[in-house]
Every structure is written in C-alpha cells, then in structure tokens.
Amino acid sequence: MADVIKTVKNTIVSRGLIKRGDYVLLGLSGGPDSLCLLHVLSELRWELGFELSAIHINHGIRGKEADEDAKWVVQHCKDNGISCTMVQANVPLYAEKLHLTEEEAGRKVRREIFGFMAYGILAENLPAGHPAAPLRNAIKGPGGIKARPASVKIALAHNADDQAETVLMRILRGTGTRGLAGIRYQSPMDDALDRLVAALLRGRKADGNTDKTISDADFEKRIEEIKTLDISMIRPLLDVCREDIEAFCTENQLQPRMDHTNSETDYTRNKIRLELLPMLAENYNPNIKQTLVRLAANSAEDEDALSAISQTALLQAEKILAPSFAQADADAQKSKAPSGGTLLESISLDAASLRAMQPAVFKRVIVSEFEKLGLTEGISAVHLNALHTAVLKNIGGKTIEFPGGHTAALRAGTLTLK
C-alpha cells in the first residue's frame, strides 16, 4: 500500500496547491475518498500551515439516507475537532427548472455553494448573516490574532481512478485535447464568482435600491472586491488510487458512508467503472487505468501549451481592431461594470486575425472569449466548426447560435460574440 499522506503532501507541495496561510474548505460527502482526504489534510494542516474546515451538501435526492449521512458527517467532524457546515439543497427542483440531469444540476449547485462560502470566508465587506461568519470568527493568525486568509482552496476528493474514468468517458463522447486532459489538479472558480455577482446585482435591482443597510458606494466596493478574490478548486488526491484510499480507511479504522447509487449502472460513469474498465483490463490492458491517467497528463501538457499560444493570438485579434472602434467597444464594456455586472455583454474580434489562426488555436480563442460572457460549458465541435467555416469564408451577416442564447455574428470584418 502506498503512503497516502506522503503522496498527498508531495502533490500539494510540488503543484503548489496549498500555500501557508490558505484556508482549505473540504467538500465532504462522507464517502471513502472525501473521508480519507479529511484525515490526510487534518494531519498535514499544522505542518503546511493552513486552516481547515469541511462543508457537506445534502442534495435532497436520497431522502432519509441522505439526512442520516449529513448527521453522521457533522458528528464525525465534531469528534475530530474540525468545523463542518451543512447545507441543504434541492437538486431535483433545480434540475427541473434548468432542464438538466440531476448529475449536471448537482455539479452546478455544489460549485455555486462552494463559491458563496469561499466568498464569505475571504470578503472584507461581508453581508450580515452570511453562513460563513462562524468560520471567519474561528480563524486565527500568528499569535492567535484573528486574521483573514489570502485565498480559499476548495478541496475535492477526486482520485486517480476518477481520472481514468473521466478520460475514458470523454473518449467515448469524442472529446478533443482539452477533454483528454481530464481532471485538473487546480482550477479557477471565476465563473462561480461571476454568478454570485450577477445574483447580488439582481437582488439589488429588485429591491429598487431601497435597502439602506448598505450604501450604493459600499455595494459597488463589495462587487469590486468579489472580482479580486483568490478562490480555486484543488484535488490533492489525484495521484492516489481508489484501492489505496480504501486501505487507508481500513488501516485508520474509518467507516465511510456508502452511497448505494454508486453501485447502480443507470449512470454512464458507473457503467464505465463497473463494466467497461474491468472488461478492458481483463481482455486488453491490465494497466488500463494507469494508461489513461498517463494520457491525461500528456494531454494536459499539450493543452497548456496550446492555451498559451491561443492567449497570445487572442491579444492580437483584440489589438488589431481599428482604434476608434476598439475604444468605443472598450467604453461600452466599461459602462457595464460594476453596476451592470462583471460579465461582459459582448466581445468584438478582428475577423482577419481569426482567419490566420490554426483551427485548434481559433477554437480555443472562441471558447476562452465565450467564458468571459458566462458560457462555460455546452459548446460543441459542431458550434465551433460552423463558426470557423463562416469566418474562413468571410460570410458577412452570418450568425451562429451557441448554447444559452449566446451568438457569434460576423459583420464588416468583425466577429461579435454576445
């Protein structure tokens, strides 16, 4: 059995996942993976110098069983001297309203809750009654003096087996290099913060500015502060296999809560875990999991290089706009924030610069720009190929529909994303 604590420490240090003075908020389901990570991080927190607490989200899906899990998790944390926040969510209702699967809705709900809690830990101008207030009051800096951390890291318990399953699932769906890179060790949460800002702005507007508990100037400062917060997701267990995690739990007499849905084959990921991977290991490659993990690592290196090239190309596409048009576009965007929100309403790019890009670079530029508009998922190869063809052929007046009501329109040598 591998030394799990040593492996996780090496992952954290070598990849810079946690720095001294950070606040780590662990997403704790109570299953083997997250329970293992809770105890590993608890062992490492004093040596590496970070604050630690847990958050458990009851998705409202498994009824009494989920309620019992929540109680168990909170008590387990209490018994081990770790603060735990329990949040109740209604994922089925959320899924119905947004026309998503419960799995997709669950991911969105978790991400938004994590972002909201992290904001509550970091923000200087915190709204009254925020659920993170007790966590803030417990933070102690040097000499026991209360202090705010520089950043919050949301720790998730994805492991090496999860990585292999994710890569294989994406291969089956026809992914590109970005998808082959699999689960990242660290990823930003800018989209969750943008949605938080948008929600605050909608609430402010709905109140008609009648809420006098905070002035307009202070509200603007709160919005600006959110935009600068350092919040990201980290996955310290990504170099540890599931077998070693289970052995760690057994050795340390941990008794994880087991979610029966993980053994059902109704979900694609479960079918891959329980049926496809064992078949591939038995009949084709006994080291299939390690092979897929290695593929993810190699693809991540390629993706990072292509992303860097794409960002340089993007700057050129933005810079080459005619000065008067570019300034007007910049002024229009500036007028939207912060009162109009941190998300841009449109972005303009020079079509000639886009035509000169390699297809892989072009597609990354488009995805990157749409992310600034709040479109973070759902863009398919069909959308990108259609847009690439329109730009190459310089089809003026052409508009391509993207998910979520977003569009890309080509007019007068300029591509405008909305």
Image (cartoon, rainbow, N blue to C red):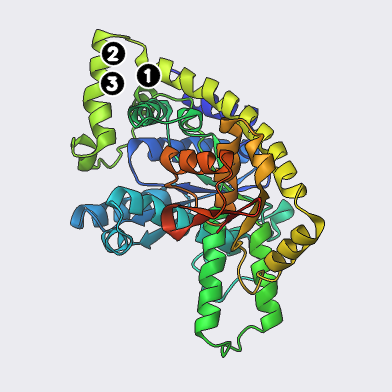
Residue furthest right as drawn: 323
Q: Earlier in the sequence, mark 2 or mark 1?
A: 2
Side (left or right) of 123 relative to 8: right
> 184 or 300, which is in the foreground?
300
Image quadrant where one finds the N terminus: top left
Give x and y (percent) for residue 42: 51, 40
Question: What whole-number distance in Å separates the C-alpha atoms at marks 2 and 3?
Answer: 6 Å
Horizontal and vertical percent position of residue 234: 54, 40
Q: Quadrant of the C terminus?
A: bottom right
Give percent across and percent down for residue 331. 74, 67
- Nearest the viewer among 235 and 403 is 403
In this rendering, would 396 be left or right of 215?
A: left
**Label 1 crowd bin: few (<14), some (14–19), many (20+), radius 10 Å:** many
Q: Residue at x 37, y 48 (%)?
A: 76
**Residue 343: which quarter of the image?**
bottom right
Image mark for residue 281: 2
Which residue is labeled 3 in the image? 277
Mark 3 neighbour class, 10 Å CA radius: few under 14, some 14 to 19, many 20 or more: some
* Callout 3 amino acid: Leu
Secondary structure of residue under mark 1: helix
Kind of residue at disc 1: Lys
Estimate the spatial distance between the alpha carbons at disc 1 and disc 3, rounded to whole Å.
8 Å
Residue 266 shown left or right of residue 395 in the figure: left
Check contact, mark 2 vs mark 3: CB within 8 A: yes
Q: Are marks 2 and 1 in contact (CB under 8 Å)?
A: yes
Reading the image, the residue beneath label 1 is: 289
Residue 373, image x, y percentages:
56, 57
